[in-house]
Image: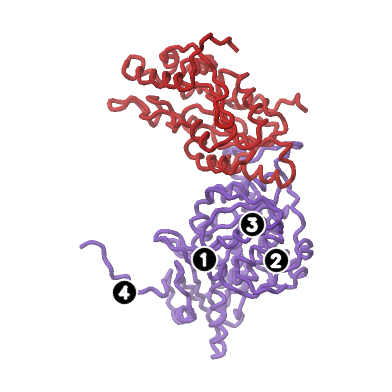
Chain colours: A red, B purple
């Protein structure tokens, strides 16, 4: 049974899709005794176009914003049937479906204490509908609804602090991950599923289409986000920071310059400075700077 | 056993007898008493169910969607804004062919905000693919829940059922209701055996993307199923009569003195009780008046309506909802029943009454019969207060 591939090839994701890599990793780490509830979004569309499905675990999609609530119902049904102890429930969605339209359902799921792992695949905009800005779009990003222009240099707000928002619910496990660090993602999924109660994992997943980077650079771009301090890999258990990936910080330009969505910033020292400040704050806040540089994965 | 109960309590007892494994709801007046009763039953251990207190109706409907998909009979109830807030999920549940029973304690829609009864909420969701049954009294409200699960979970149906009962008038009204024994309910309503479910031993994907090559057929299938439900409801009603002894005939419509009537009112829900009282009174005065009560609004029994009204000279359709800018919803269906047919009433007039809890009294009903003349009227509002219509804003 366990040799079964749970996330089959042949789906219709774009070349270089970071979300496909991460979703594959999540379900293979979770194993076959898992029910997956998916929000509407890229992952749903590219894996389950009737009459085909990429999923070899029970999988359900209902709407854009309700995966956390549908998963709550699945979990309640499993408790009623006496099958919860032997079954993982994973709810998952993109950044828009999680941090914007699905935030209420997610908050309800966390507050009620359901034994569910929620995974947010954060590609930092509404990619499925054509790269519109979401609450997790970074500061100054050029998207189709936060375009640059004579009066605009991109998205006016920094990312909504989702890890802190979910932490404030007092849930037992919160972690951030990256498609660039697959073993770290595997470990955190397994760790999360070993804990009873609501868990939240947010995975940074590059989108070549929306971020406008070369498709071969997906893993590189994901790593650069971590290595610059713009996407800290952090892990909280019962509210305490239990791990963080330490880095020898690279300047944010290295991450920004390979992506079309940030191209307008490269010759703008003022904006670059502001973005460097975001990275520096993360580095200070979570103690990301390595005393001894970490070994590569 | 016959008990003198509040409508909500009766429904809660009926739901308990149906033994749902998952219940989820969000508070909204006048639905609340139903789920409060159920929460107490779960708290007391007399009902073995997971009771999920959610943060919104959108999530209430989503929770029961997930629970049914996982193979467990489930229940929710709502009203008014709550039903509208669920609307996206309501369409989704039917589209995913998941069986469910929802009680709608009918209430008006904002604005202006108004917590009292009319039927605008459920009528507004008529196109969602749900079976909608309208109860006249609390016994029917109770019985339609047993029939609802029986219909919904049948392999030939696999669509959700909305039991519509007038808010306050029924939900908060005390009536003597026969709450049947568990054995009889079990005989009529076997344990839920899902046709498909989320199961790690037999993984399937549910809720897939259907592109233009597939979507049309999925929607067509629901339409065809609902057509067939028109002949299945009478069979379930017969099974119900055989088990419980109460006879709802075909359970699509109820005819009350329609055979020889000159004038017939068509209506749904609790107002039909008032209409029957008026008919009894007028019949004593040799007035040939009658009532055609619509029980199944979805699917709509066009042929039954045609047969019942084809020889009636004048028909008045009473709507407790309005389609703003168009003919009233029930009136449209009744008129459509005669399209392309040989016979039809000479006059089919349409009246709107009772919106936002305005009492529909015996006087209102008599007014409708009186206004049912040779001249057809459309969406004429009954019991308007002319003095309130003169106020103007600004200069």
In the picture of the structure, the residue carrying the numbered disc 3 is B101
Residue A197 point in image, percent of width and height = 63, 37
Distance from label 1 to label 3 (Cα)? 23 Å
In the picture of the structure, the residue carrying the numbered disc 2 is B234
Residue A2 point in image, percent of width and height = 76, 26
Local SS, label 1: helix
In the picture of the structure, the residue carrying the numbered disc 1 is B330
Looking at the image, is mark 2 or mark 1 earlier in the sequence? 2
Chain at numbered mark 1: B
- Would you say the residues marked 2 and 1 are in contact, meaning their CB atoms lie under 8 Å apart? no
Chain at numbered mark 4: B
- Would you say the residues marked 4 and 3 are in contact, meaning their CB atoms lie under 8 Å apart? no
Looking at the image, is mark 4 or mark 3 earlier in the sequence? 3
Looking at the image, is mark 2 or mark 3 earlier in the sequence? 3
Front residue of A234 and B203: A234
Front residue of A108 and B231: A108
Chain at numbered mark 3: B
Distance from label 1 to label 4 (Cα)? 28 Å
Q: Is residue B48 rendered to the left or right of residue A70? A: right
Local SS, label 4: helix
Quick check: can you spot residue B373?
Answer: no
Quick check: can you spot residue B379?
Answer: yes
Looking at the image, is mark 2 or mark 4 earlier in the sequence? 2
Residue A112 point in image, percent of width and height = 58, 44
In the picture of the structure, the residue carrying the numbered disc 4 is B387
Residue B171 point in image, percent of width and height = 57, 67
Distance from label 2 to label 4 (Cα)? 47 Å
Q: Is residue A148 rendered to the left or right of residue A17? A: left
Q: Which residue is painted at 54% across and 78% down in the image?
A: B275
In the image, are marks 4 and 3 on the same chain? yes
2 vs 3, front mark: 3
């Amino acid at each position: 049974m366990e040799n079964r591939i749970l996330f089959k090839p042949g789906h219709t994701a774009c070349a270089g899709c970071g979300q496909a890599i991460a979703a594959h990793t999540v379900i293979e780490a979770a194993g076959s005794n898992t029910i997956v509830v998916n929000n509407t979004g890229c992952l749903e569309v590219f894996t389950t176009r009737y009459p085909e499905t990429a999923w070899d675990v029970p999988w359900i999609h209902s709407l854009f914003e309700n995966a956390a609530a549908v998963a709550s119902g699945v979990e309640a049904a499993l408790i009623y049937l006496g099958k919860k102890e032997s079954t993982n429930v994973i709810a998952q969605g993109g950044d828009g479906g999680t941090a914007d339209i699905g935030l209420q359902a997610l908050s309800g799921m966390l507050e009620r204490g359901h034994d569910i792992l929620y995974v947010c695949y954060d590609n930092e905009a509404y990619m499925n509908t054509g790269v519109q800005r979401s609450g997790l779009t970074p500061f100054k990003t050029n998207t189709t609804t936060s375009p640059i222009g004579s009066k605009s240099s991109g998205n006016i707000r920094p990312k909504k602090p989702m890890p802190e928002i979910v932490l404030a619910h007092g849930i037992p496990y919160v972690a951030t991950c990256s498609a660039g660090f697959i073993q770290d993602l595997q470990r955190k999924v397994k760790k999360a599923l070993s804990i009873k109660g609501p868990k939240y994992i947010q995975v940074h997943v590059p989108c070549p289409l929306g971020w406008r980077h070369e498709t071969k650079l997906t893993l590189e771009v994901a790593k650069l986000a971590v290595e610059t301090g713009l996407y800290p890999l952090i892990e909280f258990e019962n509210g305490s920071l239990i791990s963080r990936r330490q880095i020898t910080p690279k300047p944010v330009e290295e991450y920004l310059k390979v992506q079309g969505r940030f191209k307008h910033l490269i010759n703008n020292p003022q904006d670059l400075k502001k973005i460097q400040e975001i990275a520096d704050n993360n580095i200070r806040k979570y103690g990301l700077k390595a005393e001894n540089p970490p070994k590569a994965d | 056993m016959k008990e003198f109960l509040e409508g909500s309590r009766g429904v809660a007892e009926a739901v308990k007898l149906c033994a749902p494994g998952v219940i989820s709801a969000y508070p909204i007046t006048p639905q609340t008493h139903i789920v409060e009763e159920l929460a107490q039953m779960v708290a007391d251990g007399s009902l073995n169910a997971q009771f999920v207190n959610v943060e919104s109706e959108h999530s209430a409907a989503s929770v029961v969607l997930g629970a049914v998909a996982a193979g467990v009979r489930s229940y929710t109830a709502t009203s008014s804004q709550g039903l509208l807030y669920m609307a996206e999920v309501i369409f989704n549940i039917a589209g995913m062919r998941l069986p469910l029973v929802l009680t709608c304690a009918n209430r008006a829609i904002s604005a202006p905000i108004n917590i009292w009864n009319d039927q605008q909420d459920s009528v507004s969701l008529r196109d969602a693919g749900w079976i909608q049954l309208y109860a006249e009294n609390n016994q029917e409200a109770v019985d339609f829940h047993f029939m609802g699960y029986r219909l919904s979970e049948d392999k030939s149906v696999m669509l959700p059922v909305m039991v519509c009962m007038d808010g306050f008038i029924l939900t908060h009204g005390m009536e003597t209701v026969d709450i049947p024994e568990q054995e009889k309910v079990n005989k009529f309503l076997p344990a839920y055996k899902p046709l498909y479910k989320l199961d790690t031993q037999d993984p399937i994907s549910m809720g897939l993307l259907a592109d233009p090559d597939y979507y049309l057929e999925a929607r067509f299938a629901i339409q065809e199923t609902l057509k067939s439900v028109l002949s299945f409801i009478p069979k379930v009603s017969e099974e119900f009569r055989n088990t419980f002894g109460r006879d709802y005939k075909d359970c699509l419509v109820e005819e009350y003195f329609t055979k020889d009537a000159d004038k017939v009112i068509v209506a749904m829900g609790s107002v039909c009780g008032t209409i029957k009282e008026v008919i009894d009174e007028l019949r004593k005065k040799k007035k040939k008046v009658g009532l055609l009560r619509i029980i199944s609004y979805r699917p709509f029994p066009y042929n039954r309506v045609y047969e019942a009204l084809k020889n009636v000279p004048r028909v008045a359709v009473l709507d407790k909802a309005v389609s703003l800018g168009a003919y009233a919803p029930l009136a449209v269906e009744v008129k459509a029943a005669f399209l392309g047919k040989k016979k039809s009433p000479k006059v089919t007039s349409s009246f709107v009454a009772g919106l936002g809890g305005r009492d529909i009294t015996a006087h209102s009903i008599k007014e409708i019969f009186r206004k049912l003349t040779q001249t057809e009227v459309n969406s004429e509002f009954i019991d308007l207060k002319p003095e309130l219509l003169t106020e103007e804003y600004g200069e």
